Structure formats: structure tokens, C-alpha cells
Amino acid sequence: MGGNRRRRLGPAVAVAPGARVDRFEIFFDLVFVFSFFIITRATAAEITGTSLLHAMLVLAVLWWTWVVHSVVATRIRLGQGFVPVLMVVAMAALFCFALALPQAFDDPREGSAGPVVVAVSYVVIRGVHLFLLYLYAGRDSPGERRQLLRFAPEMVLSTLLLLAAALVPSLIHDLDRTNLVRDGLWVAVVLLQYGTGLFGTEGWAVQSAEHWTERYDLILIIALGESVISVGVGSNLLGQPPTWPSVAVAVLGIFFTAALWWAHYDVIGPAARIALHAAKGRPRATMARDAFAYLYLPMIAGIILFALGAEEIVRGITDPTVPVDEPGHGSPVPLLFGGVICYLCGNMLFQLRTLRTLSWTRVAAVVVLAAGIPVGARLPGLAAVGLLTVICVGLVAAEVIIMGEGRQALHEEVTRERTSHEASDAAWRAQWRENASGDQPPGQR
């Protein structure tokens, strides 16, 4: 009966070598946007070292789920045949996973419903991915089926560890020991996931380098957009009448976020895309794993961290009871500057892995940002955001000048490629017009 339904909906369709991102994949990523937002909101409620650790653990597990999802999407078109039905199930599970995240590290004496929902949702998501990969991506390749079987223990063990993290703490009466055991189980999940990725990728291939790079570029843009939403919503900018400090900090926030976008997408991202296209076989697979699946994680983590810092600073700036010239207190400035440092360090490692180069301008920017933390902590919030913006925009301006010739050559090559693709697409679509006119009666042509 299930086979009949699949036949009515249509079969799973393999991804072609030059395929682009499916629209359904972008639809699916809306739930990941919500997940990033939930992580930021749950951490912003009480920023401590422990809450930041929990946020990073949850992010790492969530990111691995997305990596596996991206592997599925490089083999099967998610928006065709019966596949969207299964992916909607995975979306619902991911949504429940995100909703339960704020309770994942709550006091176990108050109940274990949240952690259990996290674990069950996780196994549903991974189960859908494994089902699609095993039955359809590997149906004609015994080698890929054997490869998938290597990942099955990771999925089973990580699920068992998450269930243990949900249920075992309630059996321990010492709260400090309970927290240590629960956090240790989450750390074990992360080590298991990423360790399996390092040592279990023999035999994998990246069918479409275009799809892989575009997929990761889009999720990074989504994360940057989520940071803007998080700052705007969490800092009560929407609930306050506009004042010159609130308008100024909003403009500065957009400027430094745009500078971070530029730092990746102006030169490094397009050049890395070409490098992945040029690589073949195992070198392509390992580059895709190292540079994209692994090194995008510190960039995403940096975005969440600087969003947390920016939110705290903006909340103080928009609070009418706080003087505009009062310096920031506590963690906002270290989080703001440290998040950008984390983002740039991840981006430099990405550049080193894909292009085998390192920009001294970015090293200098990281040093200046680190030196700017104690300075920014003594400045009013608006001035601290202004200092960060000057450093980020200064980095972009310096690279535009220093990399002028190489940057122009890269952009010209990308433009020629796009023009060629557009001409090919236009020629193909012209057949539709010819076929349509050929179907009309002679008197109506």
C-alpha cells in the first residue's frame, strides 16, 4: 500500500551534477531559522558560562543534523516525488526539537518532558534522513549502502545518549552531579557525531559542488538574518518610540552585519566555490566535509554570540532609564567582540582549507578586535558598537583596496559563468515557446 502511494506521488529523483538548491530545501530551512532564534532567546534569558556552554552543545547537535540533511539533499531532490511528504515529517520533528530546547537543560527535578521530546524528535529527523539515503540514494550502489551502515551506529548511540541525558539525571539526587552527568552525555553526543564524520567518510562523493556550496552559503545568510531579527525582537526596539540612540545603533548594527556578510561572500565564498568545483573524488569530499560541514559551525556560533552581545547592548541603549553615556556592564561587549572574532577565525580556517591562503588583514582585524574588548567595556554601549563597526567596515575597505586586481578578476569570471548559464537556460526555455506555437492551428499563429 505504501508502494502504491509512492507511485502516485512519483519516485525520488536523483540530484544532477550541476543541480542548484531546491526550493523545498529553503522552505525546510525556515525551521532551522526558528531553531537558531530559540537558542539565542533561551541563552539571552540568563547569560552565564553554563548557559553559553549549553547553547554551544545544542547548536553543535543541531548543526550536525543539518549537515546530514545537506548530505541527503545532495543526493535526492527534496521537492519532488514522495520525498516532500517525508521531509514534512522531519520538519515537524525539528520544530518540536526547537520548541523543547529551552527545557533541555532545566532542573531534572521539575520533570524530563523537554529532554525526552528533544531525544525523540532527534531520532525521527535522523530516521527520515537514513531511510531516504539507504533506500534511495544507495539503492544502486552497494558501496554507498555499506557506507551508510557505518553511520547507523552513530545515529543509534547518539539517540541513546540523548535519552540517557533526559532520563538519568532524574535518578541522581545530587544536583551538581546531575548537571555534570547530563552535560557530559551531551558532550559525548557531539564527540561521537563529529568523530564519526572525520573517520567515516571513506567512499562518499559530492555529486554537485554547485549544490553543496550554495546550500551552505544560504544557511549562513539565514543565520546572519536571524541575528538581525533576534536583536530587533529581544532588545525591545519594536516596543520603543524611535530615539536618536536607537536609530543610530540600529544603523550601526546593519553596517557591521553587512560587513561580516561581505567578508565571506565578496571573495572568499566565490573562490572557495570554484576550488570545490575544481577538486574531484576524495579531495572534493574531504574539502566539503572540513571546510563546509565543520568550519561553518564556528561561523554560525560566532553569529549567535555577537547577536547575544548586541541584544544586551541595544536593550540598554533603548532603555529610557539608562543614561546614554553609561558604559556597558558584564558580558555584552566580550560577547559582541568575541562573537565577531569567532566568526572571522572560522572564516580564516575556511579560507585556509579551501584556498590554502591566509589574509593578513583578517589576522590584524582579529588582533584589533581582541584589543578592543577592554576598550569597548569602558565605553558607552553606542560607542562600543560604533568601534566594532569601524573595525569591521575598515577590514572590508582594506581588502577591497589590497585585493583589487584579484577581486576584479574573480568577479569577472563569476559574471562570465553566470552569463553563460543564463544564455543556456534561455535557449532551453525557448523550446517551450516553439512547442507552444507549433501546437496552435495555422490560422492562429
Image (spheres, rainbow, N blue to C red):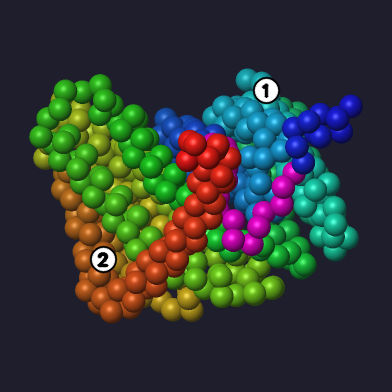
Dot 2: element:
helix
The mark tally for this picture is: 2
Foreground: 325 or 205? 205
213 vs 77, left or right, is: left
Which residue in the protein does label 2 denote? 395
User: Within the image, what quadrant is residue 271 found in?
Assistant: bottom left
Farthest front residue in view: 443
Query: Where residue 99 sits in the image (x, y, percent)?
Result: 57, 27
User: Within the image, what quadrant is residue 342 found in?
Assistant: bottom left
Dot 1: element:
helix
Q: Name the main secondary structure of what is drawn in magenta.
A: loop
- Residue located 33% across and 56% down the image: 260
357, above or below 57, in the image: below
Which residue in the protein does label 1 denote? 113
The kind of residue tagged 2 is: Leu
Query: Where residue 395 sits in the image (x, y, percent)?
Result: 26, 65
Query: Where residue 179 sits in the image (x, y, percent)?
Result: 63, 37
- Residue located 26% across and 39% down the image: 313
Numbered range of the magenta stretch: 12-29
81 vs 367, left or right, is: right
